[in-house]
């Protein structure tokens, strides 16, 4: 893109555009061997319940490192995984890992997993979730699936059916990044979400009155729909206070905690992942 734009043109690197970097073939190849080589991992970010002040949920976020140890951010590798189809296998691994990690703590009620529309459209997704829950003896209510509004996705019958199958398992379905795409309102009309996550850009616009009014309008709309409201990107104590004042149900962001591996959250006393694991490790990791 830089060459085509000519010499005197400033080309801004767009991290959301996988084609703007030329290492996408490297990433595609790495994704193919990522599971067997242990190049993917999950980090967890605490989600705080504003009413109780407790962390009772976490979001699982995937991490990838190249063979030479270089980390690749999800905005770079997720689109490649979606394009090449690797996302299906990686997504299943994530669900499995989350179920295993949930067994290690009874204090975290819910773990959310981001799912790509491609996964939802792949036949057998809900059946895989059902089998994995059964295998680990985890109840469906402890899993939430985050679907991003931002992606281009026609809400076809396959997706609607998959979502309804997941809900039948007792799992929650959350709408992620609300307000960033064009389809958000259609999604709200067609699908019953347990929680809507408002995109952090709306919180970060709250330094102006205009931004505050916009966020309050969105909150009003969602409250009338009867969904729980979570806001991401809480980076300061002022953010937290404002969200408390606005009656947001759950908050997530760097001010509360950064995403980190379960073991680190446990060591830093952020999350008690080890509670059950200590006396139940055979059953958990004996395979
Ligand atoms: P997301 O689901 O909206 O996740 C939230 C992103 O915001 C995460 O970036 C998180 O690290 C970041 N974040 C958390 N708190 C703050 C904050 O206070 N301020 C700011 N500026 N950012 C914050 P991350 O981990 O780089 O993930 C980026 C996106 O990649 C995710 O956005 C999600 O759409 C996608 N993704 C991550 N893991 C997976 C996965 O396992 N499967 C799929 N399909 N997509 C994933
Ligand atoms: Mg998410
Ligand atoms: Mg989000
Ligand atoms: Mg996001």
Image (tube, rainbow, N blue to C red):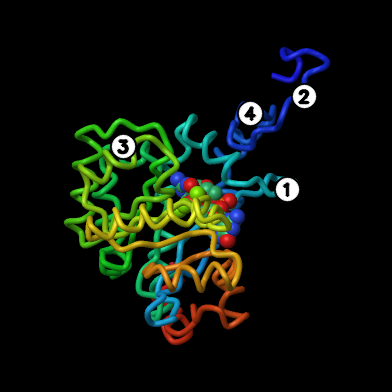
Instruction: Between residue 63 and residue 33, name the one nearer to us.
Output: 63
* Distance of label 1 from label 4 (alpha carbons): 15 Å
* Distance of label 1 from label 2 (alpha carbons): 27 Å
Which dot, 2 or 3, sits closer to the camera? 2
* Marks 4 & 2, CB-CB < 8 Å contact: no
Q: Which residue is mark 4?
A: 25
Labels 1 and 2: the sequence-earlier one: 2
* Distance of label 1 from label 3 (alpha carbons): 30 Å
On-image quarter of the N terminus = top right
User: Where's residue 237, x and y in %?
Assistant: 58, 73
Labels 3 and 4: the sequence-earlier one: 4
User: Where's residue 220, x and y in %?
Assistant: 31, 57
Q: Which residue is mark 2?
A: 10
Q: Which residue is mark 1?
A: 70
The residue sitting at 52% across, 35% down in the picture is 79
Residue reaching furthest to the right: 7
* Distance of label 2 from label 3 (alpha carbons): 40 Å
Labels 4 and 2: the sequence-earlier one: 2
Kindly state the secondary structure of the residue where label 4 is placed.
Answer: helix
Q: Which residue is mark 3?
A: 122
On-image quarter of the C terminus = bottom left
The residue sitting at 71% across, 30% down in the picture is 12
> On the image, which quarter does residue 180 sit in?
top left
* Marks 1 & 4, CB-CB < 8 Å contact: no
* Distance of label 3 from label 4 (alpha carbons): 24 Å
> On the image, which quarter does residue 21 sit in?
top right
Residue 143 in view here: yes
Residue 90 in view here: no
Instruction: Between residue 238 and residue 77, name the one nearer to us.
Output: 238
Q: Is residue 119 above or below residue 271?
A: above
Instruction: Between residue 5 and residue 125, name the one nearer to us.
Output: 5
Asked if residue 175 lies left or right of residue 214, the reply is: left
């Amino acid at each position: 893109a830089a060459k085509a734009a000519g010499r005197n043109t400033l080309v801004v690197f767009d991290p959301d555009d996988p084609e703007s970097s030329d290492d996408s073939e490297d990433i595609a190849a790495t994704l193919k061997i990522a599971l067997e080589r242990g190049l993917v991992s999950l980090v967890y970010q605490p989600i705080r319940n504003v009413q109780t002040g407790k962390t009772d949920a976490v979001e699982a976020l995937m991490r990838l490192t190249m063979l030479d140890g270089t980390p690749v951010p999800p905005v770079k590798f997720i689109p490649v995984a979606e394009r090449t189809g690797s996302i299906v296998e990686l997504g299943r691994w994530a669900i499995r890992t989350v179920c295993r990690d949930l067994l290690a703590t009874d204090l975290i009620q819910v773990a959310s997993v981001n799912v790509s529309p491609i996964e939802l459209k792949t036949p057998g997704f809900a059946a895989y979730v059902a089998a994995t829950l059964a295998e680990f003896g985890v109840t469906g209510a402890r899993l939430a699936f985050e679907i991003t509004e931002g992606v281009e996705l026609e809400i076809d019958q396959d997706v609607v059916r998959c979502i309804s199958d997941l809900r039948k398992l007792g799992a929650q379905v959350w709408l992620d990044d609300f307000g960033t795409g064009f389809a958000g309102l259609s999604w709200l009309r067609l699908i019953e979400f347990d929680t809507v996550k408002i995109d952090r850009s709306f919180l970060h616009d709250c330094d102006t009155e205009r931004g505050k009014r916009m966020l309050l309008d969105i909150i009003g709309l969602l409250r009338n729909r009867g969904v729980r409201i979570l806001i991401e990107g809480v980076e300061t104590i002022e953010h937290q206070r404002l969200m408390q004042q606005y009656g947001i149900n759950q908050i997530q962001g760097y001010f509360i905690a950064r995403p980190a591996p379960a073991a680190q959250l446990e060591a830093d006393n952020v999350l008690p992942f080890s509670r059950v694991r200590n006396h139940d490790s055979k059953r958990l990791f004996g395979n």
